[in-house]
Amino acid sequence: MSSMASGILTKVISGLRCPRFTAAALSCSGQAYSTAALPKAVVTPNDITVDSDKLLNVPLSQPDFFRVSELFSLKDLFDARVHLGHKKGCRHRLMEPYLFGSRLEVDVIDLEQTVEHLQLALNFTAHVAFRGGLILFVSRRRQFGHLVERTARECGEYAHTRYWQGGLLTNATIQYGPGVRLPDLVVFLSTLNNVFQPHTAIRDAAKMNIPTVGVVDTNCNPSLITYPVPANDDTPAAMELYCRLFKMTINRAKDKRKQLELLRGLGPAASK
Amino acid sequence: MAASRGTVVGSLLLRYGNKFAGSHIVATTVGRQPVRRQICTSCCLLRKNLAAAGPEKFTEEFIKKQVEEFNIGKRHLANMMGEDPENFTQEDIDRCIRYLFPSGLFEKKARPIMKHPDEVFPRQTAIQWGQDGRPFHFLFFTGKQSYYSLMHDIYEKTLAVERHQDRLRNKSLFTQDTKQISLVGSRWLRKEELEELLVEDISDYDYARFIQLMERLLSMPYSALEEESVQHYRRQLEVQSSKQEIPPLQHDQQGAAFSTAVGRRKTATASVVLRDGGSGKVTINGKDHLQFFPVLQDREQLMFPLHFADSLGRFDVEGSVSGGGHSAQAGALRLALARCLLTFSPEGKVEHMRQAGLLTADPRVKERKKPGQAKARKKFTWKKR
């Protein structure tokens, strides 16, 4: 699991010679317009100092640099009722590998697999936050919309819990204006929309080459999500747990970044 | 050949502004000499797709420059007209512009104006993200950040009130009869006003949801906690009767009180003098009202204002009317009489009369005849073939 994580990360990092091109590499392959109209002068890789490069590679030295595995345990997941799935009739074919079993026609998710997947997802989120990436929280459940927005506001990232207009990611220059920066990671706290169909943002993020982290329940399709986390998305306790975990990882990663910058005497200009 | 192409380039430059028009000059090296080849591109490629650009965007420096130019221009104008540059108000500017640039155009908006740039250029949102590309607002990616952040804040207030209620219930201090927010005499913000407040376009559905959420907040017993924020989204209704013009009370040489008013209906104009301390006598154009209006309906119309104010025997009415037919004259007299009665009636009565429709001028006039038709609405006989 740790080798897989570092393998994925090195593949991602190899394209990231310059932190300013993080958005371009991760968000839109080949489409330079999302960063082309920035008001600064043209940036070449030679501008980046060796120091900031080393700073970005510091978290890659260890498998669990941000110690996300210490944030939760299997017992916490069980207490928050993360293992409860939907009924047998609602089960999605592709979720069968993640199920522990079924009891009285209610599916039970395998929490050991959930722990591994959640650690991967949180680790990836922490690395993205460390590099100053834009994280977008998406959930279309009305019950938890306010909670998700509050979580996003408290960790300084972005949220979208409202009606998804078609071209928000794919038609970004016309939707927002030229020179907009798209999110570098999309976190789905519920993969379905109000009519129990896969959220459009999953497909759009995959089209725009944006990695996704998603909490997939037993009635969801985990195919297009980069880091699926098989877990329950209906119980308030479980949702509060996820929000707390994501908020803690992002804050931890950002604090670590500030700490390392201060240690190396680099100003906030290098934090890009 | 090259010269003619050059003139084409020049004319294209004039037509398409700063855009690099017509031909691109590419320098290549042939041997040791750079050869300049002219590659002509079609002018269709250079034509801007005006529809796709959307409304024109103005940068902050542009607006600031316009404001500076306006202030300097204002001082120049004051000097030109020999006025004091320090105390030069907008009305003075309008007056001077009307004098310097007299315009006979009927459309007022087409006449020359000199106004502060904030009134001329529409309010626009500035660039929403910083130097590193990170947007400032946490709901930026929804597309309607101000509207959704407003909904988020109001929902948060709803939750705060609910928590307060739960705390009171726990201490068993919860009562239904608490001070409620008074909504009398005010209305919710209209959709246009909300759009102006948010500097964003919202749909009818969004507006309906906003009103629904506010009503939900108000439906809770302890909603008085969030009174100021609720009143921020309400506007006072104007009392219509306060705008009513009441004719002044005058006194004649004997000391008797009287008032005069004018009324119009179709093409009839009537002028009425209402004298106090009379016996209920009504004179129109020198004749008695019974003689002037043989038809009962006209006499009823004439007497209705006095009947409504319960003052049939109190006043003396002297009216003069011209134009129109008998019904129109009766209507004109009725309006004039009602306006006269306002002088002698208390405040509450004014609103009653307004609601009874006595003070509203009837706007119906004869509709014009249209060409291709026999009359205003009657069409010529339609033949199938």
Image: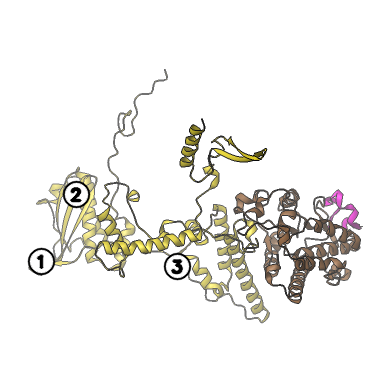
Tag 1 subunit: B
The answer to whether tags 2 and 3 share a subunit is yes
Q: Which image quadrant is residue B207 in?
A: bottom right
Q: Residue furthest front?
A: B32
**Which region shows up in magenta?**
A85-107
Above or below: residue B359 compared with residue A64: above
Residue type at mark 2: give it.
Thr
Circle 1 Cα neighbour tier, 10 Å, few/some/many (<14 / 14–19 / ≥20): few
- Classify mark 3: helix, strand or loop: loop
Q: Residue A53 at what x, y percent from top left?
A: 77, 65
Residue pointed to by mark 2: B269
* Quadrant of image for the C terminus of chain A: bottom right
Circle 2 marks a residue in which chain? B
Q: Can you say whether A128 is above or below A27 in the image?
A: below
The residue singled out by tag 3 in the image is: B184
Does residue B300 appear anywhere in the picture? no
Q: Is residue B163 left or right of residue B127?
A: right
Question: In the drawing, does residue B164 fall left or right of residue B93?
Answer: right
Q: Is residue A32 visible?
A: yes
Residue type at the position of mark 1: Asp
Shown colour of chain B: yellow
On whether disc 2 and disc 1 are found on a single subunit, the reply is: yes
Q: Which chain is brown?
A: A
